[in-house]
C-alpha cells in the first residue's frame, strides 16, 4: 500500500542521515523539542499567536492523538508536575541508534507524519521565522541537535507520538519463544527454525508483530484448508482406527429384548438379528410390519 512505502522511505531516509552523522562525528545530544501549536493551545498559553514554531518546555501540558486516548505531548518522565517538580532535563537524551524494521511499522490513517531534515541555519531562517499559514505545513514535532533539526511535518497536526518507557529495543519472536519454556516447552535453537519454517513465518519476525498482528500469523494456506476439508470428509468413511461403534447391534440388542415386540429384525435384518440373539418371533408381526402388511 502507498502508506507502507511512505513509512519505509522515511525510515531509510532517517537511516542514511543517521549513518552520515555518525561518520562525521556530529553531536547527537538532544537540545530541545519544538512544535507548532493549535489555535486553542496558542490562546491558552498566549504564545504562538503569531503562528511561529514554539519551543516546548517541561511545563508543557499539551496532548496529541485520538480523542479516546491522548498521551501527553511532552514526555512524561521529563515533564514538571506536582508529583515530579524537579524532573531530569531532556538534554540528557542522546540519539544512539535507530530501529524500524518493516515488520514493526504501525500504520494508522491520518496519524502519520513525514520526516524532514534541516541544517540549523536553514531552519532558523526558513522555518522559525515563517508563520505556518504561509508555509502551508505544520511542524508536528522537531528534535533540535547542535547542527541539525529533525522535524516531523504534519498537514493538520493529526498525529500521535509514542515514547518508550525504557531503552529496550523490540526483540525477535524466536527469542521470545525460546525464552518462554513454560509456554513453548522444549523449543531450542534448531527446533525454532523448523517451527518458523513450517509456519511460513520469517525467523526475523519482530516480537510485537508476532504477538499482536493476528491476521498474518498462524493462518492456514488455501492448500492446507482444502486438505483439512478432505480429511474431515473421509474420516467417517474410513474403517481404520480400531475404535468400537457405540451403536453396534451387539451393544443395543439387550435393550430391544426388554420388550416383547421390537424392531430389531427390521433394523439389522432377520438373520443378523437372530445371530445377535434377538428373541422376536417371526410369527408375531410388530406394529410397523403389521401396518405395511395391510
Image (cartoon, rainbow, N blue to C red):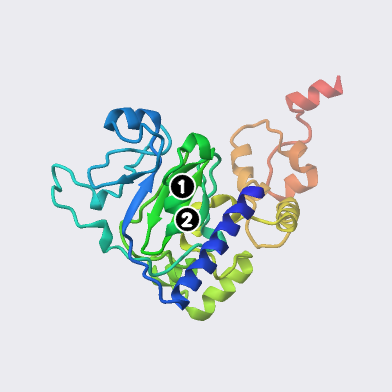
Give the residue pinned by disc 1: 127
Can you say whether 254 is above or below 205 in the image?
A: above
**Hey, which quadrant is residue 41 in on the image?**
top left
Residue shown at the point (74%, 36%) measured from the top left: 281
Position above or below: 265 against 169:
above
- Relative to 230, 90 lies left or right: left
| Pointer 2 with pointer 1, Cβ within 8 A | yes
Q: Quadrant of residue 52?
A: top left
For the point 39% across and 44% down, which residue is it? 35
Query: In this orientation, which residue lies closer to the viewer: 94 or 194?
Result: 94
Helix, strand or loop at label 1? It is: loop
Q: Which residue is label 2 attached to?
A: 122
Q: Residues within 10 Å of mark 1 (few under 14, many from 20)?
A: some
Task: Answer yes or no: is residue 233 visible.
Answer: yes
Q: Position of residue 68 (x, y in %)?
A: 40, 33
Q: Is residue 149 visible?
A: no
188 or 161, which lies in front?
161
Q: CA distance from mark 2 to mark 1?
A: 8 Å
| Quarter of the figure with the C terminus | top right
- Relative vertical location of residue 94 with respect to residue 275 in this rendering, above or below: below
Amino acid at each position: 500500500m502507498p502508506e507502507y512505502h511512505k513509512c519505509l522511505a522515511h525510515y531509510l531516509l532517517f537511516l542514511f542521515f543517521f549513518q552520515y552523522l555518525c561518520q562525521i562525528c556530529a553531536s547527537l545530544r538532544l537540545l530541545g523539542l519544538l512544535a507548532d501549536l493549535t489555535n486553542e493551545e496558542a490562546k491558552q498559553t498566549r504564545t504562538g499567536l503569531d503562528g511561529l514554531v514554539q519551543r516546548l518546555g517541561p511545563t508543557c501540558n499539551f496532548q496529541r492523538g485520538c480523542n479516546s486516548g491522548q498521551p501527553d505531548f511532552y514526555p512524561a518522565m521529563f515533564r514538571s508536575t506536582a508529583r515530579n517538580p524537579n524532573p531530569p532535563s531532556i538534554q540528557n537524551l542522546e540519539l544512539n541508534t535507530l530501529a524500524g524494521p518493516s515488520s514493526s511499522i504501525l500504520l494508522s490513517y491520518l496519524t502519520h507524519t513525514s520526516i524532514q531534515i534541516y541544517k540549523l541555519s536553514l531552519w532558523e531562517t526558513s522555518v522559525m521565522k515563517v508563520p505556518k499559514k504561509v508555509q502551508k505545513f505544520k511542524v508536528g514535532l522537531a528534535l533540535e541537535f547542535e547542527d541539525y533539526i529533525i522535524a516531523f511535518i504534519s498537514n493538520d497536526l493529526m498525529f500521535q507520538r509514542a515514547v518508550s518507557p525504557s531503552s529496550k529495543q523490540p526483540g525477535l519472536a524466536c527469542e521470545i519463544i525460546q525464552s518462554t519454556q513454560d509456554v513453548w516447552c522444549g523449543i531450542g535453537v534448531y527446533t525454532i527454525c523448523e517451527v518458523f519454517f513450517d509456519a511460513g513465518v520469517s525467523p526475523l519476525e519482530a516480537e510485537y508483530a508476532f504477538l499482536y498482528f493476528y491476521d498474518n500469523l498462524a493462518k492456514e494456506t488455501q492448500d492446507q484448508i482444502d486438505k483439512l476439508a478432505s480429511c474431515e470428509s473421509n474420516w467417517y468413511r474410513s474403517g481404520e482406527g480400531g475404535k468400537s461403534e457405540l451403536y453396534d447391534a451387539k451393544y443395543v440388542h439387550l435393550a430391544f429384548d426388554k420388550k416383547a415386540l421390537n424392531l430389531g429384525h427390521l433394523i439389522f435384518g432377520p438373520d443378523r438379528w437372530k445371530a445377535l440373539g434377538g428373541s422376536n418371533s417371526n410369527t408375531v408381526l410388530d406394529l410397523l410390519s403389521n401396518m405395511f402388511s395391510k
